[in-house]
Image: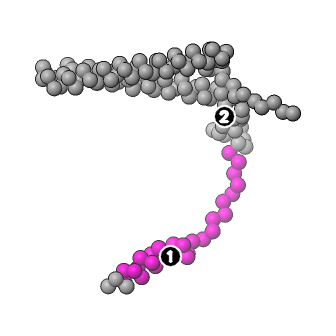
Amino acid sequence: MNVKRLIAVTTGAIAPLAFALPAFAQNIDPCQGSGSQFNKLCNLNAGNLGGIVGAGVTFLLIIAVVISLFYLVFGGIKWVTSGGDKAKVESARNHIIAAIIGLVIAFLSFFVLSLALSIFGLDIRKLELPRIPSL
């Protein structure tokens, strides 16, 4: 019984490999053509990567604020629907406190990043990567 099972498993594992045909994929350059959706990525270089990083940081701040606000609203709804139950009120209060702490952390992190960049004379929307001077 075990020999039959071993043969079946081995055959099932080897058969797809034995009968696999080679795939000859065509070399396609996604950067060719003016209507390509990859044009922004094709033009990516050290000169414009900083702008993408700055936009990413701003996007992450917006996402953090939206999530914190939804969490705050959820805590408020839990508080209203608690019906005076102390455990539910405490849970709602914890949600609201966590949401406020999340908002404070999100804004403080953006403030600290902006402050650090302004100390070095940089702008978050116009970041540029440093270049090594050529000899």
Q: Earlier in the sequence, mark 2 or mark 1?
A: 1
State which quadrant residue 56 falls in.
top right
Q: Residue at x 34, y 83 (%)?
A: 2
Q: What residue sits 63% from the left and 14% below the top?
A: 119
Residue 115, quarter of picture: top right
**Which residue occupies 69% across, 25% down?**
128
Under mark 1, the amino acid is Ile
Res 48 quadrant in image: top right
Quarter that holds the C terminus = top right
Q: Is residue 5 magenta?
A: yes
Q: Is residue 21 above or below residue 30?
A: below
Residue 81 is left or right of residue 65, and the answer is left
Asked whether the viewer can see residue 77, the reply is no
Give the image location of residue 131, x and y in percent: 75, 30
Stretch of the chain drawn in magenta: 4-30
As for residue 20 lying within the magenta part, the answer is yes
- Residue in the foreground of this view, choosing between 65 and 32: 65
Mark 2 or 1: in front is 1
* Disc number placed over residue 14 in the picture, else none: 1
The 10 Å Cα crowd at callout 2, few under 14, some 14 to 19, many 20 or more, is few
- Check disc 2 and report its element: helix, strand or loop: helix
Residue drawn 12% across the image and 23% down it: 85
